[in-house]
Image (cartoon, rainbow, N blue to C red):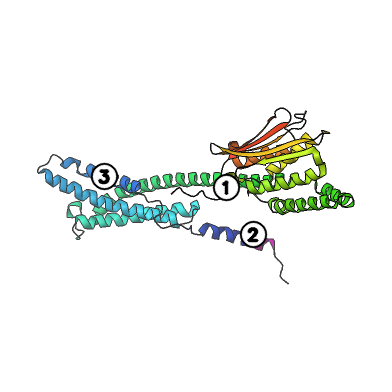
Amino acid sequence: MSVDRPQDKHRVAAGEAVRAELRLPCRSVFEGLTLKGLALIALLALLHALRRTITLVFDPPPWAWLQNFGETTVTGLIAMVLVILVVVAIYNRVSAAPRWRYPALALGVLIASLVGSVILGAIESHGTLDFCAFGGFYWWLEATWPRYLVLGALLAAVFVYFRAAEESEAAQQQAEIDRARLAQQMDEARLQMLQAQIEPHFLFNTLATVRRLYQTDASAAESMLDNLMRYLTVALPQMRANDSTLEREIALAEAYLGIQQIRMGRRLGFAIDVPSELREARLPPMMLLTLTENAIKHGLNPLREGGFIRISARGEDSELRLEVADSGRGFVQTAGVGAGLSNIRARLSGIYGQGAQLRVALNTPRGVTATIVLPYASATPIPAAV
């Protein structure tokens, strides 16, 4: 039987850390090399060529200076492009750990500037590498290489600075996106928790009423069971759904009111006025039912004579307006701040932000009107006019 020792665990952890540092990023070799960067390199090559040939500007003939200036620009551009290509490739393909990346960049600039200087010398000497005027090729290289080494180091520093700034900004944006996604997931979880609280509390009372009705009025009991089945058929799939249609929510409210009408008898009357073109409108589930339950519980039930409930919907300026108006006892001390209404407000805020709201106002001549205003969206596309 083998025993894991602490030393072995530390050794394994250190090995994993080293492998993580050495792991290559999934990037293309020349990612980050842009036209703007190449234009900057070209500008530096022009300035460098101008510096080297500025003393020859006034020497005749002028086209000789132009030719010299062009050749110097091209050769300098070749050397600097070689350096920047090496820098970009090393930055993208070497581990981001500073102890690996920066020494690799320094070595890359050193070698690339040396190779670029040799290429430049080969071009200027037409392939002979004969620089007798400078005391030989090595003396020419000693005088030329440091200049391109400094330029290469400057280019590498500029590239690394701007690339690190871009990556930092991208990481910050990704962190913001992750935070927004996490906040959205938390809001969805909170909304599901709030939605789970909106469950029909009348179920057991309805079943008890059905049992009593079968002893006195079997047809009324059968009608109540039919409405209860309609209610559960619509309600159960919607209890944990995030989206519904106005047609389903109206069917749910109508089944609920049918049950309550059998239980309350003449004390309850209701009407539903929803245009057919709005029945496919999307809305969060169970909100219309909550307003209907609220109207029964707080508006009509406390009154001996009961009252009337009217459910209506209309589209107006890209908005969907749902109204549940009752002729109940009207506002009481806690009107508008009950658990059901608070849940609706919280869900509307979580789903639509400031784009939806719940309004509670006095009805005429008595009672309360609760209005949900939310953006209109249809579940089926509207056919285009021919």
Mark 1 residue element: helix
Q: Can residue 170 be seen in this view?
A: yes
Q: Do the residues labelled 1 and 2 touch (CB within 8 Å)?
A: no
Q: Do the residues labelled 2 and 3 touch (CB within 8 Å)?
A: no
Instruction: State which region is magenta.
Output: 1-8
Mark 2 residue element: helix
Three-letter amino acid code at disc 3?
His
Q: Is residue 179 visible?
A: no
Tell me if residue 52 is in the magenta stretch: no
In the shown orientation, is residue 319 left or right of residue 238? left
The image shows residue 87 at horizontal and vertical percentages of 38, 53
Three-letter amino acid code at disc 2?
His
Q: Residue at x 48, y 55 (%)?
A: 100
Closer to the camera: disc 3 or disc 1? 1
Can you say whether 38 is above or below 348 in the image?
below
Three-letter amino acid code at disc 1?
Asp
Q: Residue at x 78, y 46 (%)?
A: 259
The image shows residue 371 at horizontal and vertical percentages of 65, 35
Give me the disc on residue 178: 1
Closer to the camera: disc 2 or disc 3? 3
Q: How far apart are the two marked residues, 2 and 3, measured between alpha carbons?
A: 53 Å
Classed neighbour count for the residue bearing mark 2: other residues with Cα under 10 Å, few (<14), some (14–19), many (≥20) = few
Name the N-terminal-most of marks 2 and 3: 2
Name the N-terminal-most of marks 1 and 2: 2
